[in-house]
Image (tube, rainbow, N blue to C red):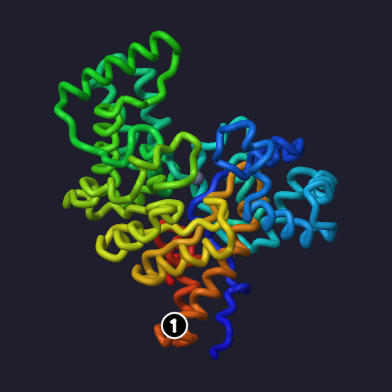
Amino acid sequence: MSDRIDLTDIPVVDNHCHSVLTRQDVDPPTWRGHFTESPDPRFRAADGMHTAFYRRLVKAMAAFHGVAATEEQVLQARSRLRSEQLVAALLADAAIEGVVVDTGFPDPDAVLPAEVFGRLGDAQQVTLLRLEPFFQQLVATHDGYDDLTDAVRAGLADVRASGHAGCKSIAAYRTGLAIGRWPEEEARTAFTAARREVTATGTVRLGHKPLLDTLLHLAFAAAATQELPVQFHVGYGDPDVDLRTAGPLQLREVLEDRSYRAMPVVLLHGCWPYVREGAYLASVYGNVHLDLSYAIPFLSTAEMRDMTRAAFGVAPTTKLLYSSDGARVPELHWLGAHAGRQVIGTVLTEMVTDGDLDPDEARWAGERVLRHNARRLYGLAGGSA
Ligand SMILES: [Zn+2]
């Protein structure tokens, strides 16, 4: 029997997360709502706290605050800390050395600015440009289709110079990941419909597939030219998602497009429940990476282990990235970092026992997945390891 591969001393780079609410004081129903993707109010009130994830969260918080493991006690304990104090304490305990922040969610007015969030955690931070809201804003401010496509090209001409380390698409929960090429006429017709929405309501939610797909292709072309990573929401992780059109294999047309081979693709959330499909793609496409997310989806430890086994079982460890997908409350970033180190350590230990890896290789792989792969991909300082 081999010794356990211990990764607890390795700081993590969280390659997919969001900032936290400026005001952390919450009532219990709102608090519970942060740990479910169900929009059903009865579920949120009565069932959400009976998941394996939520029970584990309460126990971990009880240990952190030194109180009894009840929801009431842990909420009381966290409410005794000022919001920034709570965020700083949890992020420090989690040893997060870098964060890649998607600023498109939650509403920027409600959360700490990404740089403040990074500073509180003593973490380097970089941000991603969320493509759909960027497009929506341009659709709302351009009344001609050609002006719009020119503005999209201009806005994405040098994404790093505009302050972002990559892009993120949420097409999975808008119009699906089967992102196709459309005749220009259909994209123009969809643009006219989107503009009607702008005239009627002042804004637009880009659910017009021929238009969104066309604009995404402009973004992919820009990303390929700049070798800029593009994250895709895949699978679980948003109440709006239609899982029938949000699986990773839907991306085939984009992945097969030779002109996009220089665009690093990151499939988020371990593609859960399609983790094997995601791991397969990361094992055959040179530009595809798989993000393993340890807070969202809300899973038991055993299910996180299965997700990790599936990924490490086929994909090179140079193509896997740690994340929490934490948002709104810092407990997600915190619990994710601890769970990620523990679960990846367990799976690497099994691989040593099985004879797949020796202990040095296992430790090297753990460090790559927890920090170095993300440092290199998003250009964080010290990323050449
Ligand atoms: Zn996210």
Check disc 1 and report its element: helix, strand or loop. Answer: helix
Q: How many marks?
A: 1
Q: Is residue 143 above or below residue 163?
A: above
The residue under the point 25% across, 64% down is 284
Quarter occupied by the C terminus: bottom left
Q: Position of residue 155 (x, y in %)?
A: 34, 33
Q: Is residue 181 above or below residue 262?
A: above
Residue that carries the numbered disc 1 in the rendered image: 361
Q: Is residue 43 left or right of residue 147?
A: right
Q: Position of residue 92 (x, y in %)?
A: 69, 60
Picture quarter containing residue 300? bottom right
Picture quarter containing residue 149? top left
Q: Is residue 174 visible?
A: yes
Q: Is residue 110 left or right of residue 310?
A: right
* Residue type, numbered disc 1: Glu
Q: Is residue 160 visible?
A: no
Q: Is residue 266 above or below residue 217?
A: below
Q: Residue furthest top?
A: 200
Q: Is residue 175 left or right of residue 184?
A: right
Q: Position of residue 111 (x, y in %)?
A: 63, 37
Residue in the foreground of this view, choosing between 219 and 210: 210
Q: Is residue 263 above or below residue 10?
A: above
The residue under the point 44% across, 65% down is 383
For label 1, the crowd category at 10 Å Cα-Cα, with few meaning under 14, some 14 to 19 and many 20 or more, is few
Residue in the foreground of this view, choosing between 81 and 303: 303
Q: Position of residue 358 (x, y in %)?
A: 45, 87
